[in-house]
Amino acid sequence: MGEPLETTWKKIAARVDAALERYLPSEETPPVELHQAMRYSVFAGGKRVRPVLCVLAGEMVGGRRSEVTPAACALEMVHTYSLIHDDLPAMDDDDFRRGKLTSHKVFGEAMAILAGDGLLTLAFETITRHTKKAGVAARLCEELSRAAGWEGMVGGQVFDILGEQKKPEARLVEEIHRRKTAALIRASTRMGAIAGGARNAELRELSRFGQTLGLLFQITDDLLDELGEEGKMGKRLRKDARRGKQTYPRVHGLDASVKLAGELAAKAESILEKYGERAKVLRSIPRFILERAS
Amino acid sequence: MGEPLETTWKKIAARVDAALERYLPSEETPPVELHQAMRYSVFAGGKRVRPVLCVLAGEMVGGRRSEVTPAACALEMVHTYSLIHDDLPAMDDDDFRRGKLTSHKVFGEAMAILAGDGLLTLAFETITRHTKKAGVAARLCEELSRAAGWEGMVGGQVFDILGEQKKPEARLVEEIHRRKTAALIRASTRMGAIAGGARNAELRELSRFGQTLGLLFQITDDLLDELGEEGKMGKRLRKDARRGKQTYPRVHGLDASVKLAGELAAKAESILEKYGERAKVLRSIPRFILERAS
């Protein structure tokens, strides 16, 4: 039968946390203020969605753990940097995340900007220093930079901010979701596949799986902002509507959003169907994410 | 006799500019606001010190131009991102740079932060997409990430900001100069050497040359802030003293700083002496930098 997904997830997350502990400069390393700020946000209780997907994709294609771990940690560093910068006063101006004060509230704006810059840079350092095969390291850096940059996350954040002034529009919502969230989730399964030595077909299908899962993830996030309980989520909710954010529920309504989420989960599952037992854990993730939002 | 350094410099800078033009998303590519901001700062009249050093180091070791150009452009992207973030209100709060309004004054703080993030990420994308040999690309990404990150530039900026509260101190000034400026200048000659296929001895000596030049560069920058003319420099001067920045002249005085600059220039020249004609252009750069400040 195998263990429940939660158990597998926790084990992988613990391994990733141990590796992050090694890769991040210690709190005693000067400048201590920078490293305290970087560590504060990396160890602020994130669920490690991207590293877990990366590790599971690597395992699915038969990769070695030691080859996948640096990529998994790099993804979490990039994700964390993006949250720190998104929370800044000039951006979304958030005081809380995961029930804790945001970086700039604790360390000040200058240090929050630099902690983000430091984490983004450390992601590439981690890949290149700890991935044994240079050819793999170069491909991983390319994947990460394209997913995180203008075509991906940074571009998505720009559309997101500019979209606050505009009325909700289907095409714009999709553009934002694809770039801001799906690009890095897709990179997670792709990087796991590449680090694990995937064959072309495997890479292609893990790529589609990641893309679909990424859209699902963002829609459930939008739904949680509308329907969730603040105490449980550790941050203020109903922010999207207040700010006029472009979200799927605001364009299509709650019912259509819930329906689409279900369709995306089914689609993601089916993409990896042919891999049978090997893909069993990965295939259980779409439902897991879907259930967050219901 | 060969052409004057200024002529060689202008030719290399023009080639680098043409490559940057190709590597940066066009102003018509959505989100246009992001790409306008990225291009505004990249094409704001920078002298291209780091790319020129990278190209000259690559040429010295017999490298091919096409292999060195992506690294040279990546260095300028990282340098530009660091200026955009340094100028932010939360950091140095500068309104002008090179006689033009700073990024956040033109595009707003959010876009300036994102333009910086986008450029830092694009640097790694540029190396991995345009460097033919994967092994070289991986090494270049490692060099760049280490020089730009917590050990280098980001860490240096933290020391720089925190140092504003403290009284000028020799050890701290050196730490800031080494990380904030010298690390990326050293990476410039190192990356040129690596991309150009340098032998170990060449890499070692170009590394020492870059390190020495980087310290020289920062001291002359400190001196220019004390002695320069605002109209000529295109930015406000005498800022270091006003802000209580840790600078060489503030610790050791003007005379000792001028003297040290001369010694560093002589040292840098001597490091590459044994390479004779091949290193002629590179060896003329320390004097060139020194003369800026006199």
Image (spheres, coloured by chain):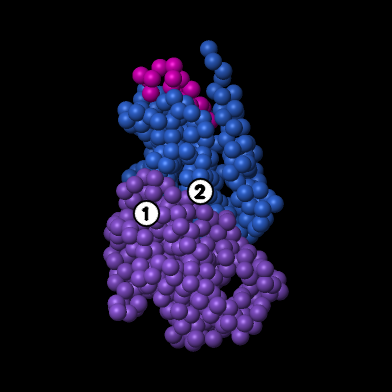
Chain colours: A blue, B purple
- Going by the numbered disc 2, the residue's amino acid type is Glu
The answer to whether mark 2 and mark 1 are in CB contact below 8 A is no
Q: Is residue B294 visible?
A: yes
Q: Is residue A115 above or below residue A292?
A: below
Q: Is residue A286 magenta?
A: yes
- Going by the numbered disc 1, the residue's amino acid type is Gly
> In the rendered view of the protein, which quadrant contains the N terminus of chain B?
bottom left
Label 1 sits on a secondary structure element that is: loop
Residue at image location 55% in from the left, 77% down from the top: B263
> Depth check: A117 or B54 in front?
B54
Q: Give the letter of the chain under mark 2.
A: A
Magenta residue span: A272-292
Q: Is residue A87 visible?
A: no
Question: Which dot marks residue A125?
Answer: 2
Magenta-colored segment: predominant secondary structure? helix
- Please identify, in this view, whether the residue under mark 2 or under mark 1 is nearer the observer: 1
> Depth check: B227 or B287 in front?
B287
Q: What whole-number distance in Å separates the C-alpha atoms at marks 2 and 1? A: 21 Å
Q: Which residue is mark 1?
A: B197
Label 2 sits on a secondary structure element that is: helix
Give left or right: position of B278 versus B151: left
Q: Is residue B117 above or below residue A233?
A: below
**What x and y, as percent, mark residue A60?**
44, 25
Figure quadrant of residue B32: bottom left
